[in-house]
Image (tube, helix red, strand yellow):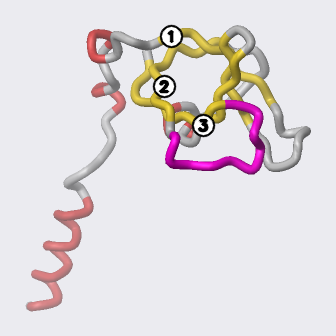
């Protein structure tokens, strides 16, 4: 009986935090979002996908948390937060993280 109770408790906790695609960040909650362009820098050592805006490039640490697929020159609208507490081996842009997306 105790194994059944333990199983029920574990099972109930596994459903407490599930992502719901209907609860993406509303546009109103991402007022500082700007347009960026995806570029593939994987040809350079220790680099991957980078976001470009004009002449400035951004190394985004959580890009895969917000996008499942990547493509050259895809435009994305996101709000970035600069991460001065991190360093990069790639060193092609400002290290940033996505706060929200439209």
Can you give x and y, in whole percent of width and height, for residue 41 in the image? 82, 33
The structure residue drawn at horizontal position 19% and vertical position 64%, both measured from the top left corner, is: 13
Q: In this figure, which residue is indicated by the disc labeled 2?
A: 80
Query: Could you classify mark 1 by the number of other residues whose Cα lies within 10 Å: few (under 14), some (14-19), or many (20 or more)?
Result: some
Relative vertical location of residue 88 with respect to residue 59 in this rendering, above or below: below
Label 3: which residue?
95
Residues at badges 2 and 1 in contact (C-beta under 8 Å)?
yes
Query: Does 4 appear above or below 30?
Result: below
Q: Is residue 93 left or right of residue 68?
A: right
The dot on residue 34 is 1
Corner quadrant of residue 36: top right
Q: Secondary structure at mark 3?
A: strand
Answer few, some or many: residues within 10 Å of disc 2's Cα (few below 14, many 20 plus, some between 14 and 19).
some
Asked whether, in this view, residue 60 is left or right of residue 72, the answer is: left
From the top left corner, tell me how far across and down residue 97 is, in percent.
Answer: 50, 35
Q: CA distance from mark 3 to mark 2?
A: 10 Å
Q: Which residues are magenta?
A: 84-93
Say which element carries label 2.
Answer: strand
In the picture, residue 79 is in which quadrant?
Answer: top left
| Residue extending farthest front | 84
Q: Is residue 95 left or right of residue 102?
A: right
Chain-order first, disc 3 or disc 2: 2
């Amino acid at each position: 009986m105790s194994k059944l109770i333990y199983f029920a408790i574990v099972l109930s906790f596994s459903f407490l935090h599930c992502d719901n695609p209907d609860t993406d960040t509303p546009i109103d909650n991402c007022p500082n979002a700007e347009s960026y362009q995806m570029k593939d820098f994987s040809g350079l050592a220790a680099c991957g996908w980078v976001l470009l805006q004009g002449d400035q490039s951004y190394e985004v640490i959580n890009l895969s948390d917000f996008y499942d697929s990547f493509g050259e020159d895809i435009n994305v609208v996101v709000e970035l937060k600069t991460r001065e507490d991190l360093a990069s081996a790639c060193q092609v842009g400002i290290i940033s993280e996505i706060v929200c997306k439209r």
